[in-house]
Amino acid sequence: MPPDEDTARLRPVPPAPPAGTAPPRPTRSPAPPPPTAPTFASTGISTRLPPPPPGYEVARDAPLRPDGPPAPAHRGPGPAHLTRTPPGGPPTAPPPYRRPAGPPEAPAGTSARLLPVPARHPGRTAAAIACVVLGLGLIGGAVTGSYLTGDSSADAASGGGYAPLRTLWHSTPVDTFFPSTLKGDGAGPGGADRTWTRVAVSPDTRCADALDPLLLKTLRPVGCERVLRATYADATSTTVTTVGLVFTEGEPSAMEALGTRFTDEKLTQRTDLMPRTYPVKGTVAAGFGDGQRASWTVNVLTEAPVVVYAVSGFADGRRIPDPQPVAKATADGAKTAAAQSGLGHDAKGIADRVERGLRTTVSMATEKPR
């Protein structure tokens, strides 16, 4: 039976000595001296360390790694595995270097410098968030308010600038549009002063009843809502003048286009576009009809949906065969009856003052409260 691998091998027993002889006592070899602690010199280990590689530092708690020749193989007695030198040389200690604690190394070609992290301030962060929330609330409130009040860019684009003026024709007192007396300092021929007194005021009138058909057709692009009229007489009651305010339905762009057309096409000089008069029985203007028209003016406003006009003539009812627009009747050296009697100046002076008052009313109506 073959011996088991775990069975210990026994040494052979020597033959017994002859009878009568004492066996020789074994001699003891002198005890080896106690081992002494190895020194760095006896082991061949150097206390010098090479400089650490880039990015590493010396590990204070790691064993030193020899940098001299490898230690000789063990030659003393003992297990066989201690007498063999492992492949690649004797065992070496772990490297005595380690990476220093800190931020990771930057890749090659990039900068390893990192920006400092700013200190956190919880109070400032909370204040910033509160400001953002408050700002968003104010913006939202402004937008909501604009929708509720109609004060938006969409309303302005669709004629919102005229919205407060659409009702002026029936909400404004008569004396505001047509004062009982108009002062015309330097408004007469040669810079003479003029004074005009109101003799009649017409109720608001439909456009078809107050305007000539051709003039009404010319105003069709802006529409016509109502016409307000009044008639004035000069201080001597020799001349009479009807002034009118045509409130249109047009938007700002349409009013600008109409005003440009009147200027470019010189529509204010066409006799067939003369405005009509407003005669009133029982007044000095009783005989003031279409045949008595001597001079006129028409002005298209853009700050309000209004066309201002004025037409003048003699109070005695005489007919005027050659009426002239204001520009010609007020020109220097004009010899017509309208020019020499100052009818051109009357039409222009009254129209200017009524228009001036209208502009003041429009400014007050569109002024936003503070």
Image: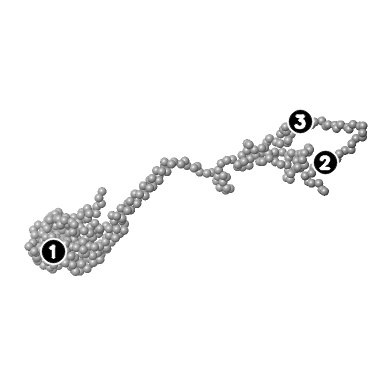
Which of marks 2 and 1 precedes in the sequence? 2
Determine the secondary structure under disc 1: loop
* C-alpha span from label 3 to label 2: 30 Å
Q: Is residue 4 visible?
A: yes
176 relative to 57 in the view: left or right? left
Of marks 3 and 1, the one in the foreground: 3
- Please give left or right for residue 276 compared with residue 260 in the image: left
Q: Are marks 3 and 1 in contact (CB under 8 Å)?
A: no
Given residues 314 and 232, the one toward you in this image is 232
Please, what is the three-letter code of the amino acid marked with disc 3?
Answer: Pro
Q: Residues within 10 Å of mark 1 (few under 14, many from 20)?
A: many
Residue at 57% in and 48% down: 107
Q: Give the Cα separation between the discs numbered 3 and 1.
A: 148 Å
Whole-percent x and y of residue 99? Answer: 60, 41
- Judged by depth in the image, the label closer to the viewer, 1 or 2, is 2
Q: Residues within 10 Å of mark 3 (few under 14, many from 20)?
A: few
**Residue 109 vs residue 262: left or right?**
right
Residue at 79% x, 31% y is 32
Report the residue at 85% width, 31% height from top: 27
Front: mark 3 or 2: 2
Residue in the image at 27% along x and 63% along y: 254
**As shown in the figure, which amino acid type bears the numbered disc 1?**
Tyr
The residue indicated by pointer 3 is: 34
Residue under numbered circle 2: 10
Snapshot quadrant of residue 347 = bottom left
Distance (Cα) linking label 1 and label 2 = 156 Å
- Callout 1 touching callout 2 (CB < 8 Å): no
Q: Give the residue number, with chain letter if any, for mark 1.
A: 278
* Amino acid on which disc 2 is placed: Leu
Q: Which sits in the foreground, 242 or 105?
A: 105
Residue 34 position within the rendered picture, expressed as x and y whole percent measured from the top left = 76, 30
